[in-house]
Structure formats: structure tokens, C-alpha cells
Image: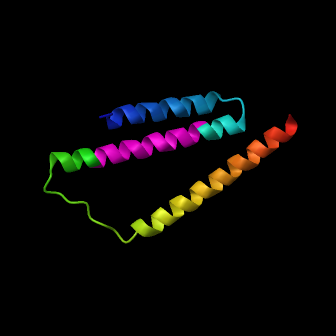
């Protein structure tokens, strides 16, 4: 299994690429990758903690469904923005 430290290192690398990116769309893509790597690192940390102490059960929170909906809405906005950018890029050709 990939460790949380590896995901975090990839996130740092993605942020470094975002810093040196020459276009805003590239910068945004690298930042999205960094967010993804950090989320995966967090998941691995939680899973590792559960495996190490199997007596712990994840506790549901009242925030979970709301956060999940917000995540989906953000994903749709990002997808829409990417489609708009692709349509704009295609129109240039």
C-alpha cells in the first residue's frame, strides 16, 4: 500500500510544479492534483489507524452528508470550468 508520506511528497511536488507553471490552467491542474494527493494521504492515515487499532470504529458525524454534497458541487463546477476551457481552446484552432 502506498504510504501517506508518499502521497504527501507527491502533493508537494505538484505544488512545486504549480509554482513554476507558465499558464493559469496548468497551475490550476497541478493544484487539483495536490489536493487529490493530500486527500488520499488523509485516507491512508485513517485506514492505517483503524488497522493498527481495530477496536476503533469510524464515528459518523453530522457534517459528513453536507460535506459530501459540497464536494460534489465543487467537482461539478471544476468540470464545467474545464469544459469551458476546452471549448475555448478548441475554438482557437
Q: Is residue 48 left or right of residue 87?
A: left
Q: Is residue 81 left or right of residue 51?
A: right
Task: Return the residue nearer the eye: 11 or 84.
Answer: 84
Q: Is residue 65 left or right of residue 85?
A: left
Residue at position x 21%, y 50% from top? 50
> Residue 32's x, y, as percent?
56, 43
Q: Is residue 56 above or below residue 10?
A: below
Q: Quadrant of residue 52?
A: top left
Dominant secondary structure (helix, strand or loop) of the stretch shown in magenta? helix
> Residue 15's x, y, as percent?
54, 34
Q: Quadrant of the N terminus?
A: top left
Does 44 lie within the magenta span? yes
Does 43 lie within the magenta span? yes
Counting the numbered discs, the total is 0
> Residue 7's x, y, as percent?
40, 35
Instruction: Provide the residue span drawn in magenta.
Output: 30-46
Residue at position x 81%, y 39% from top? 90
Amino acid at each position: 500500500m502506498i504510504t501517506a508520506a508518499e502521497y504527501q511528497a507527491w502533493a508537494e511536488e505538484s505544488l512545486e510544479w504549480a509554482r513554476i507553471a507558465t499558464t493559469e490552467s496548468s497551475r490550476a491542474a497541478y493544484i487539483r492534483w495536490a489536493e487529490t494527493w493530500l486527500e488520499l494521504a488523509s485516507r491512508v492515515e485513517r485506514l492505517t489507524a483503524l488497522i493498527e487499532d481495530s477496536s476503533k470504529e469510524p464515528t459518523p458525524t453530522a457534517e459528513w452528508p453536507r460535506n459530501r454534497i459540497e464536494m460534489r458541487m465543487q467537482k461539478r463546477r471544476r468540470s464545467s470550468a474545464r469544459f469551458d476551457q476546452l471549448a475555448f481552446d478548441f475554438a482557437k484552432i
